[in-house]
Amino acid sequence: MLIGISPVISPELLDALFRMGHGDELVLADAFFPGDSCNSRVIRADGIRVPALLEGILKLINLDYAVDYPVIMMAAHGSDSLDPAVEISYRRVVDKIWPGTPATERIERFAFYERTKKAYAVVMTGETVKYGNIILKKGVIPVK
């Protein structure tokens, strides 16, 4: 264990966060997401829910303030519907750690898969909510 780093952050995830550059994207995928089909760098976080991972990750990196949407989620497919509680629970964490972050962008399911192919890594979580996937775009640490 390391002081100040959440126990939900595995050594492999910590390494990925360290190696990511500004503008790189990290996908936190729900348990049903085709992570291995979409990206060659898959990190396992089985049993860990997305809000807990967001809390641990966002204390270690900041979101990209130079883009319109540093937080992206999947839009409902076809006539399917979203549970607004999912985004609310994710945004509660985002807004607590990085207040002022722009609204979450929603993108079409297959566009989300394509974006995942270009992401730095995919974290396969234990999240079981419908449309529980989220992309975070890493920013630069402001120099004071």
Image: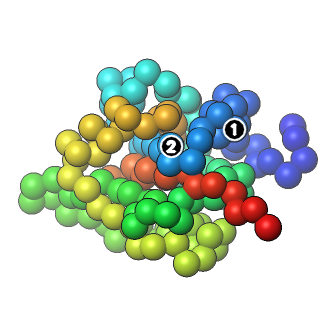
Q: Residue at x 85, y 52 (%)?
A: 4
Return the residue at label 1: 18
Measured from the top left, where is residue 9 in percent x and y?
70, 41
Q: Residue at x 65, y 40 (%)?
A: 17
Q: Is residue 118 visible?
A: yes
Question: SS class of the residue under badge 1?
Answer: helix
Total labels: the figure holds 2
Q: Residue at x 70, y 63 (%)?
A: 142
Q: Position of 34 compared to 121: left or right?
A: left
Q: How is the image coloured?
A: rainbow
Residue closest to the far bottom: 100
Residue closest to the far front: 144
Return the residue at label 2: 24
Viewer-side residue, 8 vs 104: 104
Q: Quadrant of residue 11?
A: top right
Q: Is residue 31 visible?
A: no
Measured from the top left, where is residue 94 in percent x and y?
56, 67
Please name the amino acid that badge 2 sits on.
Asp
Q: Residue at x 75, y 62 (%)?
A: 143
Q: Are marks 1 and 2 in contact (CB under 8 Å)?
A: no
Position of the C terminus by quadrant:
bottom right
Q: Quadrant of residue 14?
A: top right
Query: Looking at the picture, does residue 101 appear above or below residue 138?
Result: below
Residue closest to the far right: 3
- How crowded is the residue under tag 1: few (<14 C-alpha within 10 Å), some, or many (20+)? few
Viewer-side residue, 107 vs 77: 107
Measured from the top left, where is residue 10 in percent x and y?
70, 34
Question: SS class of the residue under badge 2?
Answer: loop
Please name the amino acid that badge 1 sits on.
Phe
Give the distance between the C-alpha atoms of the residues marked 1 and 2, in whole angstroms. 11 Å
Measured from the top left, where is residue 141 in percent x and y?
69, 57
